[in-house]
Amino acid sequence: MKIRTVLVSTYKKDGLVEFVRALDQLIHPQILSTGGTAKVLRTAGIEITDVSEYTGAPELFGGRIKTLHPKIEGGILYRRDKEQDAQEAKDHDIDGIDMVICNLYPFEEAIKNENITMEDALEMIDIGGPTMIRAAAKNYKDVVVVSQPSQYDMILSTLEEHDGAIPLHMRLSLAIAVFRNVAAYNIAIVDFLEHRAGNFEKFPALLVKAFEKVHPCRYGENWDQEAAFYMDKASPFGIHSLEKLWGKEISFNNYLDIDACFQLLSDLNKHEHVCAIFKHTTPNGVAVDGNSQLEACKNAFSCDPLSAFGGIWGFNKPVEPEVAKYIIEEKNIFIEVLLAPSIPKESRKVLEKKQNMRVLEFGNMLAKREVLYQNLEIRGILGGILLQDYDHAGIVKDWDEKTTRKTSTKERETLVFAMTVCKWAKSNSAVFAKVTEHGMYTIGIGAGQQSRVHVVKLAHSKALEFKHDPTGSVMATDSFFPFPDGVEAAVDAGAKAVLCPGGSIRDGEVIARAEELGISLVFTGKRVFRH
Amino acid sequence: MKIRTVLVSTYKKDGLVEFVRALDQLIHPQILSTGGTAKVLRTAGIEITDVSEYTGAPELFGGRIKTLHPKIEGGILYRRDKEQDAQEAKDHDIDGIDMVICNLYPFEEAIKNENITMEDALEMIDIGGPTMIRAAAKNYKDVVVVSQPSQYDMILSTLEEHDGAIPLHMRLSLAIAVFRNVAAYNIAIVDFLEHRAGNFEKFPALLVKAFEKVHPCRYGENWDQEAAFYMDKASPFGIHSLEKLWGKEISFNNYLDIDACFQLLSDLNKHEHVCAIFKHTTPNGVAVDGNSQLEACKNAFSCDPLSAFGGIWGFNKPVEPEVAKYIIEEKNIFIEVLLAPSIPKESRKVLEKKQNMRVLEFGNMLAKREVLYQNLEIRGILGGILLQDYDHAGIVKDWDEKTTRKTSTKERETLVFAMTVCKWAKSNSAVFAKVTEHGMYTIGIGAGQQSRVHVVKLAHSKALEFKHDPTGSVMATDSFFPFPDGVEAAVDAGAKAVLCPGGSIRDGEVIARAEELGISLVFTGKRVFRH
């Protein structure tokens, strides 16, 4: 196929003059153009024909109608190899347009301005552009469609290599890019109109999403799985907002841990200092402290110092130098990922000794909780997805003390703390926690068990293994006790107060047993499963 | 706004005549129409004007050009409230088009025919339709866009209620529907062209997806989370292909378990009979048997009969009546979900006694393994997704026996079986398994622990709790041993052969210790994490 006529109508002008000039020199086509594009090309000394002159129809309505004309769309769309099409084209004085260079009004960029008026936003919805490039893409067998400035160089080098032609497989790739981009363009319009108009439909019958690749992962959950990390184009904030200061590439599994760790920091952020250590997407040790980040860090580490090695460590406040020194110099702990709002200079100096450790700053993201949780949570299953609200509404629905022994203020705080950690441990989970002078910390975390009583025993055994004394501790668990044995196990361990959602058909038996054992049993009315 | 002129150009004609006739009677508009639509309306006795007569331009190229004309697009797009637009419209003899009734060439339906030629598929890519409805949607302040037959009734009743007008908020909703549908339409084209042309890009820079709601869930992972289940429109097969025979609504958490259970059945499907029981997305008991489904069922149940209650039970073969009787009559086990290729009549009679139990047939889906795993696995994280190959390539990369004691054939089979179960248990996990007369079964499954040695001990303790004898068993674990203690724990339990991926910096120490202990230690070269 020879390219005789080229139509140029672009919003973005970067690189355009150079591209069209090079095209002109390479293949000497007739060049049709519109409005602002025509002016730019003409000013640059490139000979062009105005589309309005070519069609005999003027540009109308402030540019809303420029190319929507049978001579243009027909010139793109007619099938060169059909005799009837060729004859009709001839009869109606329609010449073939063999290449379309067009990019769309930048709707997505325009709406990044939060103050844009509805009128201005609507004006940025391109109608003629998508029509032209979709027409060219449909007819890719006869037409080359250049829909992004980033394609210019590749087009020129291909034309040079192929004697002024673009091979079919590349024309098809260019066509696919068009349908993909127009899809994303329309998705951006949907997102904008729904949010601006306030009639956002959370679970529409048809859900359309556009994702932008942030970067490929070296591999996926395991070494032989290919993987990549994408941001949702509708989400200005997210894990993609975290900035890596240094360290190895962030892996697929790191991202899962970072996601969970950041959310736990967010859940506990009313406390002055939070330190949360994750391993295999489950908390491994968590502590809060009203006075000291170092205390929070030491206490979180103490919960299970064995697994804390190679873990993901998160802080809700800038990492203090003494904390950096504790981790690196005093304990020499190998950490996979460290995240915090920021890493002050003095702390950096210490942490930088570990050049493999991934160090991430998340800036003011903890203040974005509400925006972040406007997103829905996606769980992939074979051939589809489950979509749900994030579980961000708070872990206590109704605080309901079920036994005679009433909880103290400190116990209540610690139970809520333990339940918050429980929420992030894989279900079923149980967490023992204790009070410190100015805070609280976990002393035994059990996670991912198939039954309640097992997970309580597991959490207890972990507490003992790392020399914690669960006497006088509190325990929280993420769902109801199906039998009294789970409560018995908690009391055996030494817990004085137990928190659970309630809701078992044997709640009566469970409460009676707790009463007998003389502990506080409190129901929250809220389950916190996480699988 | 008064609707004076209506443009009708639809592919699907269902309900159209009735709709347009009712419109005619309600608001007496001028009706413009094209080709086939015009013929249908005229035949029904409705007075219409042909678009080609109206524009003075003929339909061309086998219908590729019908409405792409300034008189049509300008009539839709001009802003009624702008004096200059109104003047230009008048000057160029362009009348306002106030309602557009249009639905697109059914591209998605056409390509369901796997034998469709590229030429025929391309012909089904609508250009004029999307242009018209996007133009009308952009100008929703002045234009009503009716893009689906399902909207006809609502339009008529609204016109009646609002004295021949459609309120602005509804015009906006109709506009949003257009952008959403056109997005999905383009996504379908991308998927088709990529797959047909064989240049599928697995991780494109821009990823566009369309999902169709299968149904809302009663709630999400917890009671206070709203949720819904969607199928990927690009996936003909998936969990949405399973057919529920009876039982309560399938919950969000059920879907997670069904997804995992089905995939484990698929992984073990080379065995004649497989029974897999899941709880909290982790296997709770799994068995295979060369002869008897009942044996597989009994053995799977025996692993942890406590947690098997309320579990998700899957079979790779139609459920036999004796198995149904064992579950329901002999053991009276409460099962949340039961899935199998089919439930023969005689078994149904037994299972139907449990009307709350969700009973699902998955037909020939086990034969679709390759198609199913063309999908990529999606993991949602805040503001984005991780996308990866499913881990379906096989759990052994290189079978590498590291110690003097060589494994027997039976041990090798059992190790692979145990590792397959391990793959589906949340990381870190460890599985003890034993041989039966005609098969194998798990005797202790530990899952979701933060360290290797703990999970081995956990799996061991679970085996003991349910009266299994791990002496002479084998054990598999999903990642390497960071220290020799995990191997020691396995041998303490009674394992004679241990399977792991290998890859620790202390592999040497671990192998030496296994050698000392006189067991077989085998490396697979393949990690099977699942979080």
Image: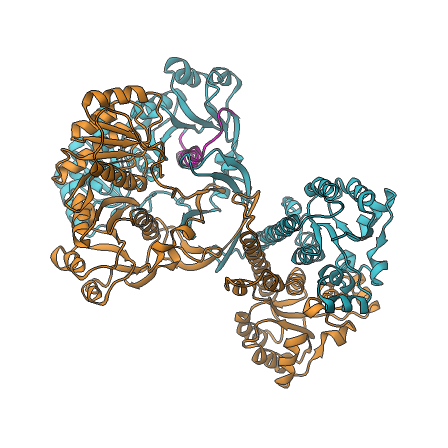
Chain colours: A cyan, B orange
Magenta stretch holds residue B367: no
Image coordinates for residue A527, horizontal then vertical, percent: 31, 46
**Residue at 76% over, 51% down:** A9
Q: Answer with left or right where residue B224 lies relative to residue B198.
A: left
- Quarter of the image that includes the N terminus of chain B: bottom right
Q: Nearer the viewer, residue A469 or B267?
A: B267
Residue B9 placed where, x, y %? 64, 72
Residue B242 lies, with reference to residue A226, above or below; the image says below
In-front residue for pair A439/A31: A31
Q: Position of residue A385 (x, y in %)?
A: 43, 51
Q: Magenta region: which residues? A: A246-271
Question: Picture quarter containing residue A51?
Answer: bottom right
> How many discs mark residues in the rendered view?
0
The answer to whether residue B55 is left or right of residue A288 is right
Is A104 on the left or on the right of B385, as rendered? right
Image-quadrant location for residue A486: top left
From this view, report whether residue A1 is shown above or below residue B494: below
Whether residue A253 is in magenta: the answer is: yes
Residue B478 visible in rendering: yes
Q: Residue at x 24, y 48 (%)?
A: B277
B238 vs B210, left or right, is left
